[in-house]
Amino acid sequence: MKIATAQEMREIDRITIEDYGIPGLVLMERAGLAVASKVVELYSDKKVIVLCGSGNNGGDGFVAARELYNRGFNVKVLMLSGKDSMGPDCKTEYQIAKNFGVPVEFRKAVGAGDIHAAVVIDAIFGTGLSRPVKGHLADVFALINKSNAPVISIDISSGISSDTGEVLGEAISADCTVTFGLPKRGHLLYPGADHTGRLFIEDIGFPKELLVSEKLRLNLIDSELVSGLLPRRQKSSHKGDYGHILIVAGSSGKTGAALMAAKSCLRSGAGLVTIGVPESLIDVFQSRVTEEMILPLPDDGKGMLSAKAADEILGFAARKIDVIAVGPGIGVSEGTEKIMVQLIQKSAVPMVIDADGINSLKGNTNIFNKAKAPIIITPHPGEMDRLLKNSVEARKSGSSEGTDKINTSLSFSKATGTYVVLKGAPTVIAEPEGRVFLNNTGNPGMATAGSGDVLTGIIASLAGQGLSPLESSILGVYLHGTAGDLAAREKSEHSFIASDIIGFLPDAFAHLDTA
């Protein structure tokens, strides 16, 4: 499913009206009716307060008010701006509502008594807001948020930027949001996602070709998108058909990262997994592995890889390996810095680079342009910021936190030719060709040590089974999040750990296989 900006949605609106001939009032009628139907479906309460603004969002609110009033609900509309400020379609729907007998009051203040025991419909701003909410409206929003009244927002919670998810001064926290045609960025990006509640996407008659257009570059990762990516297995296949993955990971005190990446790689379907580890730690690893194989690599005498390991990694990969995953727990040293440069420049097989593999580059992002094979990087925001520090991409794209997440990922991907999996809530995937994908699975319980190592193993495994870098990233983050959601359901968000995510990967695959 595509995700739209406010401008993209306005353009879809305009084309629908001007080129397809569906009047704006028809779209407004359908939107308002969809909201009214959702109120009837979700709430048995018969008292409804509709808070209307003067634009099209307010017009949608008047339609919903009229429909609910006509169905026997106790409805009142509070118009929070003057009659003279109404747009033409909003004014038309206001007059129709009045003709039906819907009570409408024009006022700036809303009291606790107005919304007591009522369902509140937020039809104030919608997607067009670009300035901070202040004054009496900020007071109204604060009152609603402090109340126990259930709130349905139309299109997007008033006070949330549709494009960034930013709270513009003050914003309404909705229990659910009814939007039209496509989800908006502000529904999925935080803090806007926290104000959205349950999101319902309603069809109000936009032409399908506009909603699936490749001009819309941002996509939501959902079960429909990923179901076709799951690798299918032939009955006559053998382990060699499902990839041999080399995971270069671990150092003194960080052996768990390597083991979790390897376990998740196997649980995600890899045929063979070899862990490349500092040779001084070989006994530690050998006593803890079962299905995995171990490749001892030259170390620096302190339990970390030495620069000499690069040639052995490359030689082993050239003979046996389909994908290299590098970084979990390797630490940062002069040796790891040299290893990363050599691997990026010389590896003939795709790589997944995570954690200390990224940190070891220390902002040397130009090295990616010398890569021979596709590269997927999987940083969290802190690692992305360190990678961008003093680089050209940093000046182009800004921070990897908050509202710049999409632009940061896309700018870096285009500039370096890498596939970027910027972890977080939500995880953002960008490809060099300009498409971006947002993942909506996962939960706060996944903010735990080792969760990123598990993701590295999953993505590397899928790439080894023949999926493209983009497909591996999309399916990988979806499965990772789904396994986390299943773990949270069973063990609670507070109590599950990264190895539990691995334990629920079989259920995540089964869930997807039956979706």
Image: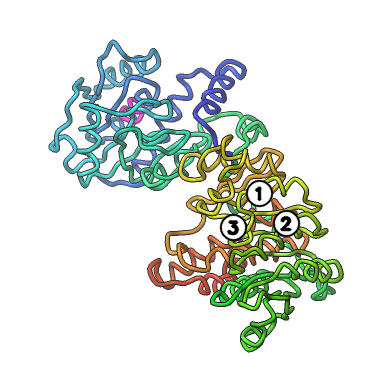
Horizontal arrangement in the rendering, residue 42 relative to residue 364 (left or right):
left
- Determine the secondary structure under disc 3: helix
- Is 176 or 26 nearer to us in this picture? 176
Q: Quadrant of residue 259?
A: bottom right
Residue on which the image places disc 3: 359
Residue drawn 67% across the image and 84% down it: 282
Q: Are marks 2 and 1 in contact (CB under 8 Å)?
A: yes
- Is 332 or 260 nearer to us in this picture? 332
In the image, the segment drawn in magenta is: 61-66
Name of the residue lying farthest toward the top: 84
- Determine the secondary structure under disc 2: helix
Horizontal arrangement in the rendering, residue 250 relative to residue 462 (left or right):
left
Q: Position of residue 477 (x, y in %)?
A: 59, 57
What whole-number distance in Å separates the C-alpha atoms at marks 3 and 1?
A: 10 Å
Name of the residue lying farthest toward the right: 319
Residue on which the image places disc 2: 341
What whole-number distance in Å separates the C-alpha atoms at marks 2 and 1?
A: 9 Å
